[in-house]
Amino acid sequence: MDALIPIVEKLRCGGRIDAAEALALWQDAPLWLLSELAVAAKQRVSGDKVYYNRNFHLEPTNVCTFECKFCSYRRRAGQDGAWDYSLEQVLDIVRQRKDSGATEIHIVGGVHPTHDLYYYADMIAHIKQIMPQAAIKAFTAVELNIMIDRAGLTTAEGLALLQRAGMESIPGGGAEIFDADIRRQICPQKGSAEQWLSLHRTAHGMGIDSNATMLYGHIDGLSHRVDHLMRLRELQDSTGGINAFIPLKYRSANNELSYLGETTITDDLRTLAMSRLVLDNVPHIKAYWVMYGKQTTELALAFGADDIDGTIDDSTKIYSMAGAADTAPTMSIEDIHRICSNAGFRAVERDTHYNEI
């Protein structure tokens, strides 16, 4: 514990820790200390506020050309459990929620074997005609790189096309763990860390903000997590375009890594706290309630999280297919306020770009 004192004092004074200090703190600090430090860091950014939004997810397909070992969501075309909505079916989903009050539509799916950039740009344009008031946060960097490459455009050209169609922001998925060796083992077909970072860097330069994620709790170690966070911190130092970081807990049902089981709630809380302490330049740390469950999400607010995502409206299957407890994820505004109040914080509605509503 004595060896941690200089690190703790640096953090209490608002200083920045390096990779070695982060690893030492992650390994050796007691849980109560990480909670204290992370909440203090959170309060310097957002005071007593915890953010949420009114949103729904749109998952046009789970047909995917990749075979990531951690994924419970993807299917091959024609395989049992696969879906591949037509454009009209997608638009019907949006029409059903037209008057829901949602301010954000979050669109991700599988890397479809044939759909290209123009297909998805057309989809976005049609969605905006139905819900012009809702911001569209669309497609992981992995999806974007593939669809833009198929169109024969540069990254900037492809993003500009989607931007003109109505895309405002990019979700953080596809980052997984940046370490190349880990990626070779769990998602060998997926693009590299450098490709993920490069696409987000380009987007930020065009005024398209984004989130960032890290998939943890499988074959990764703490050194891999620290490296991942450090690379994100470096990107954010350069661009300032990351709105929120979301640590994503690996869920073990129905995938090739199921034999690993799942990491503990204590590890979840330590990961949240260390994310807040390392990413001193990222405004918000999100405890994604669909992944953690509502009870753990409430605990997460004592470990530096200041966002819990949104109402969802039973519109995502990614985590329920991987074994998350809430198989029809929906959160009422009353539930959100109760969770935040129970943890000693104040729920504040936001839009996609963290403007308060």
Image: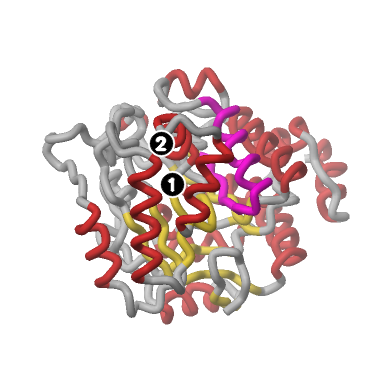
Q: Position of residue 308 (x, y in %)?
A: 50, 63
Indicate left or right for 86 with 133 as reference: left
Q: Amino acid at mark 1?
A: Phe
Q: Position of residue 156 (x, y in %)?
A: 58, 40
Q: Is residue 128 above or below residue 167?
A: below
Q: Is residue 266 visible?
A: no
Q: Position of residue 191 (x, y in %)?
A: 48, 27
Q: Report the front residue among 268 and 180.
A: 180
Q: Is residue 310 above or below residue 174?
A: below
User: Which numbered disc, 1 or 2, marks the residue that appears first in the sequence?
Assistant: 1
Quadrant of the image containing the C terminus: bottom right
Q: Quadrant of residue 333?
A: bottom left
Q: Secondary structure at mark 2?
A: helix
Q: Is residue 310 above or below residue 341?
A: above
Q: Report the front residue among 292 and 178.
A: 178
Name the residue: 70% across, 33% down: 23
Indicate left or right for 236 with 133 as reference: right
Name the residue: 56% across, 72% down: 350
- Of labels 1 and 2, the one closer to you: 2
Q: Is residue 101 visible?
A: yes
Q: Which residues are magenta?
A: 192-214
* Residue ID for mark 2: 147
**Crowd class of label 1 (few under 14; some 14 to 19; many from 20; radius 10 Å):** many
Quadrant of the image containing the N terminus: top right
Q: Position of residue 263 (x, y in %)?
A: 44, 40
**Crowd class of label 2 (few under 14; some 14 to 19; many from 20; radius 10 Å):** many
Circles 1, 2 touching at the beta carbon (< 8 Å): yes
* Residue ID for mark 1: 139
The disc label shown at residue 318, or none:
none
Q: Amino acid at mark 2?
A: Met
